[in-house]
Each structure stands twice: as C-alpha cells, then as structure tokens.
Image (tube, helix red, strand yellow):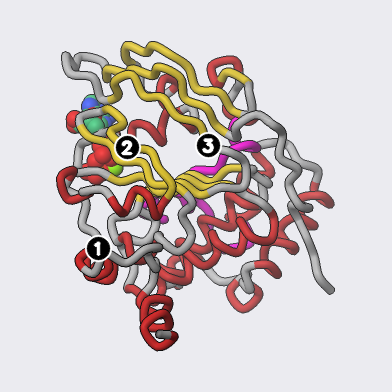
Amino acid sequence: MFINPFKKIKHSKLDVVEVKNLTFYYSGSSRPALENVNFGLAGGSVLLLVGVSGCGKTTLLRSIVGLVPKFYAGKYEGSVLLNGKNINEMDMPEISQYVGYLFQNPDNQLFSYTVERDLAFGLENLGVEKSEAIKRIDEIIQLLSLDGIRKKPIYELSDGQKQVVALAGILVLRPKLLVLDEPTSLLDPRTALSIINIVKMLKDKFGISAIIVEHRLELALEISDYIMVMAGGSVKMFDSTRQALRNRLQDYGVAVPPVISVQRELMCDPLELTVKDFVGRLHAR
Ligand SMILES: Nc1ncnc2c1ncn2[C@@H]1O[C@H](COP(=O)(O)OP(=O)(O)OP(=O)(O)O)[C@@H](O)[C@H]1O
Ligand SMILES: [Mg+2]
C-alpha cells in the first residue's frame, strides 16, 4: 500500500521562509553573527548554505527555527517569516510543525530508550492523540524503511541509523521545511548519501523544502536548487546552483568538487553536477 503522510504540499505564493534585514548579535558580543541577511526560498526548493567556519550558517538556521532569539538571547533586528507569518509571533509548538531542525549530531536529538518511543516523543509533547500518533509513526517507519529497528534501543544503532531516526522524529510532525545543519558530517560517504537521498525523496514526492549546510558539495549539488554563500555574517551570493558554481566560490573558502573545476577549465556549458552526468556527456559526443 502506498502511503503519503504529507500529501503533496500545496505551495502558497508566499515563500516557505523569508528573511528580511536580519541582524543578530549574541549577548555580550560586539560583532554581529548575522548582518542584514535577506533572502527568500520558494516552496518545494532546496537551498545549500555554504561558507567558512564562523560565517553565521548555524546562527541563521537557529533564526529560521526560532531558537534565535527565543533561546539564544541577543540584539535582534529584522524579521523571519514562515509562510508569511512572523516567527516571533509563533510559539515553539507551532514552529516545530512547520519547520524541522536536524542537528549535526543525532545524540543531541534522541531522548528516548527505543526508536518507537523516540518517534512518539515530539507528538506527545504536542498533545497529539494516541491513535493519530500511532498512525503517523507507522507511516514514517514505512516511508523510511525503519521496521527492522523500530523496537531497538537507541544505543544499539549506528550513527547513520541514529541520524535517520532523528530525521524520522522530525517528520512525524509533518513539517513543510527541513533545516539540516551538517547532517552528514559524522557519517561515512555512503551513509551520508543515504541521508541526502531521503531529503531528495521528500522533496520530489511530497514537495518538502530544505535548507542544508553541507561542506561536501559533491553530496548536496544533486539535490540543491540554489546555493547561498555567507561570509562574516552576511550573504555574499544567492544563485541557482549551476550559476553559483560558475563563480569563484573558492574566494569564500568553499571547496568546489573536482568534476566542477574540470568543467570550468574546459568551459563546459551547461555544467553537469555529477561525475556520472559528466561522463555521460563525454560519451555522448
Ligand atoms: N551561542 C553563542 N554565543 C555567542 N557567540 C556565538 C554562539 N554561537 C555562535 N557564536 C558566534 O557567532 C558567529 C557565527 O557562528 P556560527 O556557529 O553561526 O557559524 P557557522 O558558520 O555555523 O560555523 P561552523 O561552520 O564552524 O559551524 C561566530 O563568531 C561564533 O563564534
Ligand atoms: Mg555551524
């Protein structure tokens, strides 16, 4: 039986997230972690966020999930709108049903003894009725093929399995936007790819949007519609993925995959984003 826990998300004309003139200083800091950040993301798209360490990526993600300024105090100017609504007028339960935040380290996100209990955690916190909670948990377990581990204790899982369970714990809340902060950095390349493929499936099948911070560009290029480059708390570039790759991203400390550098040297147009597609193009000549 094909299940569709999210239905196909109908996108409103409003951006799924819009950030307007956002400036933020952490308490006690004289340097802004974010400085006049402006961008919008259309529903159903994936944005890859890059830039050197300390440029403000995590702070921006915290702002998009409301942790800044609700949990991280400081001087805050500007606004973040989720589907047109100011995030500062939303409480955490409302925000968490719109945008899900996946941390780098799943150990910071998993609180319960077993997988099944962990998936129930967020739903119980929201007061979702038991029968509805069971239905949602079953759907996500089926969608992410977690049946084999649903009764397992969290401590018996591999890091990759933990990350998928952490993602599942977010998906049961049925968010429209996922915010992923270096979700694969603790994982081997193959397991990392499986996380990226889940994000791709969620986008393609259900229209879920995502903002992902990922240093291994070769992993994320295939799923990203846009690339945004930050430096010193500001946005330096926001462009479609292929257009952004034509620019000198290395000037912002961003390592471009070799397959892109080779094509730039060869002045290929359009750029192929994967080795497979590039080789395919060579063979087609
Ligand atoms: N909780 C905090 N309190 C005070 N300053 C902070 C806090 N978190 C981050 N900062 C500062 O804000 C700036 C931006 O940090 P942020 O963590 O957003 O960068 P980042 O781009 O995510 O870096 P990385 O790639 O290392 O994860 C840095 O100068 C950092 O030291
Ligand atoms: Mg960070």
Q: Between disc 2 and disc 3, whose residue precedes?
A: 3
Secondary structure at badge 3 equals: strand
**Quarter of the image where one finds residue 13:** top right
Q: Position of residue 267 (x, y in %)?
A: 26, 64
Secondary structure at badge 2 equals: strand
Instruction: Please tell me which residue is depicted at 41% across the width and 36% down the height of the picture.
Output: 61
Secondary structure at badge 1 equals: helix
Q: Quadrant of ligand 2?
A: top left
Q: Would you say residue 165 sits in the magenta stretch?
A: no
Q: Which residues are magenta?
A: 95-117
Q: Amino acid at mark 3?
A: Leu
Q: CA distance from mark 3 to mark 1?
A: 27 Å
Residue, disc 2: 237
Q: Residue furthest front?
A: 285
Residue, disc 1: 264
Q: CA distance from mark 2 to mark 3?
A: 14 Å
In the figure, is residue 176 to the left or right of 109?
right
Q: Nearer the viewer, mark 1 or mark 2?
A: 1
Q: CA distance from mark 1 to mark 2?
A: 19 Å
Q: Amino acid at mark 2?
A: Met
Q: Amino acid at mark 1?
A: Arg
Q: Within 8 Å: ligand 1 and the Cβ of disc 2?
A: no
Residue, disc 3: 41
